[in-house]
Image (cartoon, rainbow, N blue to C red):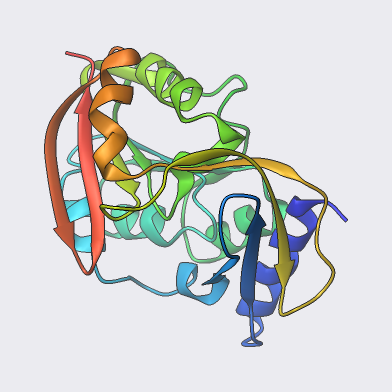
Amino acid sequence: MTALAVFDTALRRAAAGKPAGLTVHDDHGPAFRVDAADWSRVDLPGDRGLLGRCAGPTLDIGCGPGRLTSALNRLGRPALGIDISAAAVRLARARGATALRRDVFAALPGHGRWRHLLLADGNIGIGGDPARLLRRCRDLMAPGGRLHVELARPGTRSWSGNARLSVVDGAVSAPFGWAVLCIDDLPALAAATGLTICDSWTEGERWFASLTSG
């Protein structure tokens, strides 16, 4: 089973009110669990500061069921969510978010014109290569735009490579590319990808930074 199929299953379970715990297995430490139901909530602690920094057109990368995209839309701010999961895009649209099934590394609308980009909920791990992802985000941004990224807490070990998913102790998926980036390791990676850290903050026991190419 592919990781995407497991992810879709977790989202469908969460939407139906069933247990939707996802376990991430990798070769870099003990497995850890995330609850897909959290992504379907109206908000999470820490969302407020993230949303407050998105004052213009925003691209929500890996939007999942559209928690952040729909919140921006409710605030009257133009936002587009993208996700490779068909289940995620359906759920996002059902809650009123503007969302497309797209891969961040494929052709996207608004290339080079987005004022804000979001990489929340661990999405810095998309593709298993944070440097490649940050360079892609830099290319998608308008001049002077901002990328707002959620990072692992200080002291966490950064890693990239293969991971596998399972939902509610089900079958483990085939490997897929994923990564974890500790906030301590962001400055060197930002410099290597042509980005500058312009802000960092913590809220709701989450760690964030804003970057710009300006």
- Image position, residue 148 (x, y; %): 27, 39
- Image position, residue 54 (x, y; %): 21, 42
User: Foreground: 194 or 137?
Assistant: 194
Residue sticking out furthest to the bottom: 18
Please identify the quarter of the rendering in which residue 115 is found.
top left
Q: How many marks?
A: 0
- Image position, residue 41 (x, y; %): 43, 75
**Residue 114 visible from this viewpoint:** yes
Q: Residue at x 32, y 71 (%)?
A: 44
Q: The C terminus appears in which quarter of the rendering?
A: top left
From the viewer's perspective, is 138 left or right of 129? left
Please identify the quarter of the rendering in which residue 199 is found.
top left
Please identify the quarter of the rendering in which residue 160 is found.
top right
Q: Residue at x 19, y 62 (%)?
A: 48
From the viewer's perspective, is 137 left or right of 165? left
From the viewer's perspective, is 32 left or right of 196? right
**Residue 81 visible from this viewpoint:** no
Q: Residue at x 17, y 40 (%)?
A: 55
- Image position, residue 179 (x, y; %): 53, 41
Q: Is residue 102 above or below residue 138?
A: below
Q: Residue at x 63, y 70 (%)?
A: 22
Q: Is residue 78 above or below residue 30?
A: above
User: Foreground: 63 or 192?
Assistant: 192
From the viewer's perspective, is 184 left or right of 123? left
Q: The N terminus appears in which quarter of the rendering?
A: bottom right
Residue sticking out furthest to the right: 1
